Amino acid sequence: MSVLEKLRIKPMEWVEDSEGPRFRWLDTRLIPWEEVYRETTDYERVARAIKEMEIRGAPAIGIAAGYGMALAAYYSNTNDVNELLAHLEKAKKVLAATRPTAYNLFWALDRVMKKAKDSLGKGVDAIIRAVVEEAKRIHEEDVRQNMEMGKIGSKLIDDGDVVLTHCNTGALATGGYGTALGVIRAAVEEGKRIRVIATETRPLLQGARLTIWELVKEGIDATLITDNMVGYVMYKGLVNKVFVGADRITLDGYVANKIGTYMIATMASRHRIPFYVVAPSSTFDLGLEGDAISIEERSPDEVRTVLGKVLITVPSINVINPAFDITPPNLVTALVTERGIITPPYRENIKRVLSR
Ligand code: MRU
């Protein structure tokens, strides 16, 4: 059985049967109320699923984009190599325009495109095969890397710890295991008795809806707090460690992650609580430094309402809605990657550990 077949939660899948290949994913907008899988053979539908956050979380976005390219290749309907390549370039552009912050998206698209170009001389069928195989490889690698990060990161967790986490970094945000939540899951699998405090993560409630759903499903002791309770629980000594994921990390250790992460890191530093960021190498943008990361600004209605259902303010009120913030490296105790744990100074150590 492949590592993907063994997963307990399957956030997405490449399906191949008599009806022809297609991409299937769990619509995370409906969790925890309903578990609905959607399917398509159309890469533009995959782009829409990413943009509208049916699929979300940095590694999951990258994997889905890879499968989007696989669909674009398979259903391109051409026998001409140059036409196929032009079609793939177009699909890459559409998929890249969905969300700006998660580096995994651009990393996966470049990786698949490179594979197509490397197979240029071998003809249309070989290019299609290469693109589909590369998309599947990206998915499988992500799960393996998550499991490796789980093993490495769980060494930082002690029996009896209470771990605070933010947003959703589990199976639903990745290929099916998890980054920060993967570390928590691995620690529990090793028999450590730990408890998890999850923030609700306004405005889209990834913590309350998705993280809690996963923790309950896994039988892990979980407590939900609103985002503005973090200072209180830290002041009261109710938390020992913080584990979060990342959407993009620069070469000098600036971390873009879900809005609210910077506030949690600042509070953790004030209370001398270790603050760990868990991310695979595909999240590291070594072409960027400092806080020069593009931050997605989303619809004001996400703040004016609860999940678009209940209006909670005056409809015309001005709103800002950055989906992510940036935590500077001096607030990060360590970065956990599949290649090892990276500690400061980040500028030297990120390059060194990632080149292993
Ligand atoms: O806007 P989202 O839900 O795509 O944001 C996701 C996050 O910020 C996660 O914390 C991040 O991707 C961590 S790694 C799975």
Image (tube, rainbow, N blue to C red):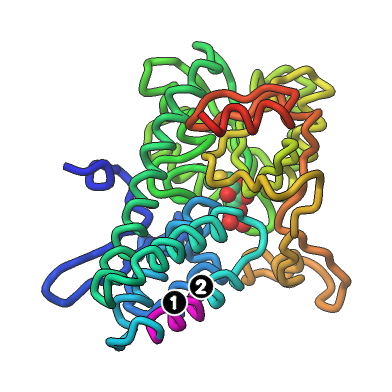
Q: Are marks 2 and 1 in contact (CB under 8 Å)?
A: yes
Asked whether residue 40 is drawn in magenta, I would say no
Viewer-closest of 106 and 49: 106
State whether residue 283 appears in this view: yes
Q: Residue at x 55, y 17 (%)?
A: 156
Q: Which residue is mark 1?
A: 88
Q: Residue at x 29, y 43 (%)?
A: 7
Residue 322, above or below 225: below
Could you classify mark 2 by the number of other residues whose Cα lies within 10 Å: few (under 14), some (14-19), or many (20 or more)? Answer: many
Asked whether residue 87 is drawn in magenta, I would say yes
Report which quarter residue 260 is drawn in.
top right
Q: How would you classify the magenta stretch by its main secondary structure?
A: helix
The residue stretch that appears in magenta: 83-91
Q: Which residue is mark 2?
A: 92
Q: What amino acid type should be assigned to the residue bearing mark 1? A: Leu
Q: Residue at x 37, y 35 (%)?
A: 218
Secondary structure at numbered mark 2 = helix
3 sits to left or right of 314 = left
Residue 291, above or below 35: above
Viewer-closest of 84 and 196: 84
Measuring from the top left, give residue 271's x and y in whole percent: 80, 20
